[in-house]
Amino acid sequence: MMIKQKGKSNSGKKEAVQIRKFYGGKKPMKRRTTLLTLLILMLGLSFVLAACDAATEDAINDAAQQVQDAAEELAPTVEAAAEELQPTVEAAVEELQPTVEAAVEELEPTVEAAVEEATGGEEEEMTEEAMAELSCEEPIKVGLITDETGSLAIYGAHVLRGFPLGMEYATGAPGVEGDGYTSYMLDGCEIQVFVRDDQSNPETTATVGRELIEVEGVDFLVGTVSSGATATLQELARENEVIHIAAPAAANDLTGVTFNEYSFRTSRNNYQDSVNMCEYLADQYTNLVQIAPDYSFGTGSAAAFRDACTLNGATFVADDIFAPADTTDFTPYMDPIFDAIDNGAEALIVTWAGGGFVPLLQAATDSGVLDEIPMAAGFVDNVVMPAFFANAIGSTSGILYHYTLPDNEINDWLVEQTQAQFETFPDLFDADAMNAAILVVEAVKATGGDTSADALIDAMEGMEFEGPKGTITIRPEDHVAIQDMYIVTLLNVDDPEFKYFELVETNRPDVPCLLPEELVDRCGELPIGSLSGE
């Protein structure tokens, strides 16, 4: 509520003119005093006349006439005095005007606060009433695709915990089992979640994705674990104009060269991993070599580490080494690593997801590579940490999430409910899955239940929401999910509650825009193609 007077500085003069008009254009107080005195004298004379004889009355009449003559004689003097004082009064009003306005302005916040306090309950009631008005004629449908039985099923388990917990948190109640789906209520809107297993196989991803779109009529597709399979899901979303949310796949390409406006993510990308880690790696090691799987996740990671670590002063002394994602014998790949060691490599960066990490580590150990140089890799999930990093106690590296690291109420809730409902602790990708569910619900709220692609895209681009990792920002230019990442020191690998780490630092990496040439105008002022933008 605004009570501050706005206008020109002559507002005081306007007030003075209005006062003069009310009193016939004369100075009010002086004239009123003189006339009042005369009236009193005349009233007193009338009482005296009533009590006197004729002679006395004639004398009194003569006196009254003298009073009247005196009044008429004084009138011009009174009026002249009033006119003489008028500029002084106007100047005083004008001089006081800034003081009055300043006092009003100073009191304004107090008045507004009082009004807000007085009406706060009513406004809150109106807000709750408006929220209760959210209703949908048809159920909103979400297709959740993850790996339940394939090569990355260990990570699919995280999604199958985190997503339903995210739906429960965001809607305020657990889901109810329906006919092939789980139902959640958001005021008057029913949200149905259908789950499908793609076994991290792109062909299976395509099959179950089409079934969800064509048979179930889903409005959202969420998933999946494998970056290669997620690219298939992303293309299905584009073809059918359905919103897609990637979680937990990390490939740069999803919000880079294969970007489309229908596809979003809550998972980090390769660049966020590399920016988080390379500041520390480059401080410890000058010369590096790296190995990664030969598909979008691995090639993207290698490119990002090369860019980020080089920018921080390190040098790669050999070409990046790539092996097929299904490799089980890594012995042939140790030779180029030894060549890099001969050229001065001081550390081996390893990017790998899934079961292939074990034979890779075994080959590096058996061949003697790890006797020559240490392995530099981001820390992984709770279950496989003992197998991968038992010999790395005391080392410092990066991790995208661990339940002991974020300090916020939503993460506390996730930890509590994961223990209560699943009898374990949240793991590496539980937070990504929970954030995907929260994003679905926040998008529906923002559109008032409108699930058209145009409405959802408008609502989701630039959206900020709170999740177990803190604030997530969906970058409008390329739909990258800006989020916290962590640097930790490994304390142990045998704690029964997986309390393995000590937090060193929380980072929030800025990453380049990696959109293809035809979409590069969307990047705006972001660095394009690399951290330096060159």
Image (cartoon, helix red, strand yellow):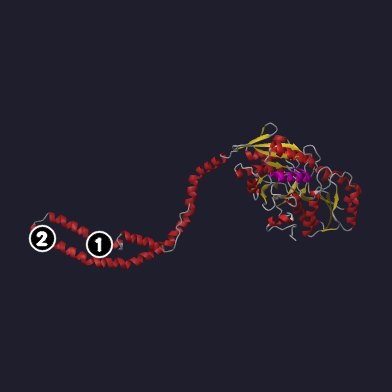
The one nearer the camera, 235 or 135, is 235
* Disc 2 packing (10 Å; few <14; some 14–19; many ≥20): few
Label ID, residue 34: 1
At label 1, the amino acid type is: Thr
Quadrant of res 436: top right
Vertical position of residue 525 compared to residue 439: above or below: below
In the rendered image, residue 228 lying in the magenta stretch gets the answer yes
Judge whether residue 496 can be spotted in this image: no
Q: Which residue is mark 2?
A: 58
Q: Which residues are magenta?
A: 224-244
Residue 105 x %, y %: 47, 57
Q: Residue at x 72, y 45 (%)?
A: 239
- Picture quarter containing residue 414? top right
Quadrant occupied by the C terminus: bottom right
Q: Quadrant of residue 339?
A: bottom right
Give the side of residue 498 with respect to residue 137, left or right.
right
In the picture, the disc for residue 237 is none
Q: Is residue 434 above or below residue 281?
A: above
Does residue 255 belong to the magenta stretch? no
Distance between mark 2 and mark 1 Cα atoms: 26 Å
Q: Secondary structure at mark 1?
A: helix
Residue 363's x, y, as percent? 89, 46
**Foreground residue among 243 and 51:** 243
Between residue 366 and residue 26, name the one nearer to us.
26
Q: Which structural element holds mark 2?
A: helix
Q: How many marks?
A: 2
